Structures are given as C-alpha cells and as structure tokens.
Image (cartoon, rainbow, N blue to C red):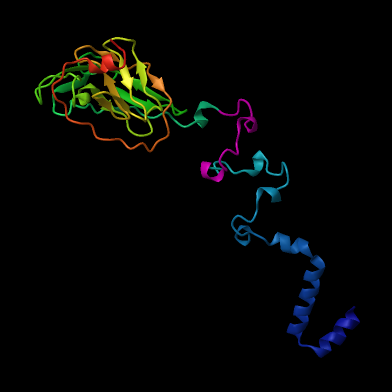
Amino acid sequence: MNTLLRRVGSAVSPVALLVAILALVLSAAGVGYAAGQIGTSGIKNNAITAKKIKKNAVTTKKIKKDAVTADKIKKDAVTADKIKDGSLTAADLAKPEVEHLATFTNGGEGDCVWTSVSTVITGIGPVSYRKDQLGTVHLAGILSGADGPGGDGDCDNGGVGQSSDAIVFMLPAGYIPGKTLIFGGLGATGVVIVGVQGVTIGSLVLPPGAVATGVSGSPSLLDGITFAPAESGVTLPKTTASRRGDGGALLKAIGLS
C-alpha cells in the first residue's frame, strides 16, 4: 500500500492525493456516515409520514414535554381507546369559562326593566351564562322584570309587534341550543331558551338565542339550566320594538298557561 501511495504521490499534487484518500475513506464508510450527518434542517417538511415510522418506535421518552399541541394531531386520530385509563387528570382538560354576565334587553323601547335579583339580595349570583370543559352551556342567577317608563310603559308580550317584551337577554352564537327548550315548569315563571330556528306562533316571533319568560313581576330561576349548544355561526336577527298588547301571549302560545 505504501509503495502504491508513493507511486501515486509522485504523479499528483499533495492536495489531489489528499482528496483521493478522503474519497476512498468516505466510500468505505458507506451509508452510516451519511446518516449520521442528517439533521433536522436536512429533512423536508412533511417528508416523514406515519407509514415511515416503525410501530412503537415513538415512545413517551422520545416526545418532548409540551411538544405535541392540538394543531399537530390529526382530527379524530386520538380516540378513547388510544388514551391510557387514568392518564388524564382535571389539569389536562381545558378550564371552564369565566361566567359571562347577561346584557338585559328593555323591551325595545324601555318599557321592560329586567334585572338580576343579586342586585337586591346579597349572596346570590348574577344572571350569567358560561360553558364548561365539555362545551355544555350553563345558565345561572334569578331574573326579575318590571314595567319601564319608556314606550307604552307596559312590559307585556301580547299583541302584534310586542314579542321583544318577552326577551330578557340574548345568547350569542355558539351558546344557542339546536331546538327550543322550556325550563321552570308550566307556569308564569317558565323560561324559554330559543333554538337556532327561532319561534314563530302567530304574532309572537322570538329570534334564535332569546332567553324569554312569560310575564314580568315574578322572579324566574336560571340556576340548574344546562344544555348542549348547536354549532356556532348562527346569524341573529334584530328584535323589534314593542307595542301594547293583551298580555300573556308567550305562555299561551307555547302552552305554559
């Protein structure tokens, strides 16, 4: 070998000889050398697919803490049978929302004054709504209504154009049930949560998301009202101004009186 190198060295420059020796060494090292030189920057985005990863090759120890975020997981890829029993704790779930305080309506012209009983009784929570970790909507509080000084001065949902007198507040898109729901029993204090299709019975028209009650003057309880919302993206129409009516139309129309 030394004799061969001396013969070759006499025919080529030292630099050319060095390059030739390096080429010989690299070719002998083969694929092992090249594989050791491939870093993260050498891998094309999306080049390594699920089929390219050996089964059970990616273990818990190989995954960096907080490295796998929701946007990195294919939709519906992680099913219940893929999650180890007892591995998820409350800390791993999304936190429940902070309560959203209800924004009360006023009958369209100020003739309905809706308030939360919490403003006059200490220790009672305000009228509010929120979603829990599973997306269920929860209402809370006690509401009360009274005649206001505006419009016709009468908080009464009967008659044409007076539907807005029944609406206490509006739920936003994403918090509206798929179908209209009735809570609180068949009486004057019953609470109606209007679904995505709205409610139209004769002259009574309630838009999607309306939280309505039959009459003012009697407190209505919202605590314990829960329901699953429909998909978000519902377009909410504007409510109409109220005019004087004969009263009780909401309860009569939906069979609460």
Secondary structure mostly seen in magenta is loop
Q: Residue at x 35, y 22 (%)?
A: 139
- Left or right of 253 in this view: 75: right
Looking at the picture, how far across and down is residue 247, in whole percent?
18, 15
Rendered view: 42 above or below 99: below
Residue 123 seen by the camera:
no
**Numbered-mark total:** 0
Residue 57 in percent (x, y) is at 71, 44
Residue 84 sits in quarter: top right
Residue placed most toward the observer, 204 or 75: 204
Q: Nearer the viewer, residue 222 or 39?
A: 222
Q: Quadrant of residue 173?
A: top left
User: Which residue occupies the foreground of this view, 87 or 28?
Assistant: 87
Q: Is residue 136 left or right of residue 84?
A: left
On the question of residue 144 being in view, the answer is yes
Residue range in magenta is: 70-88
Residue 63 relative to residue 94: left or right: right
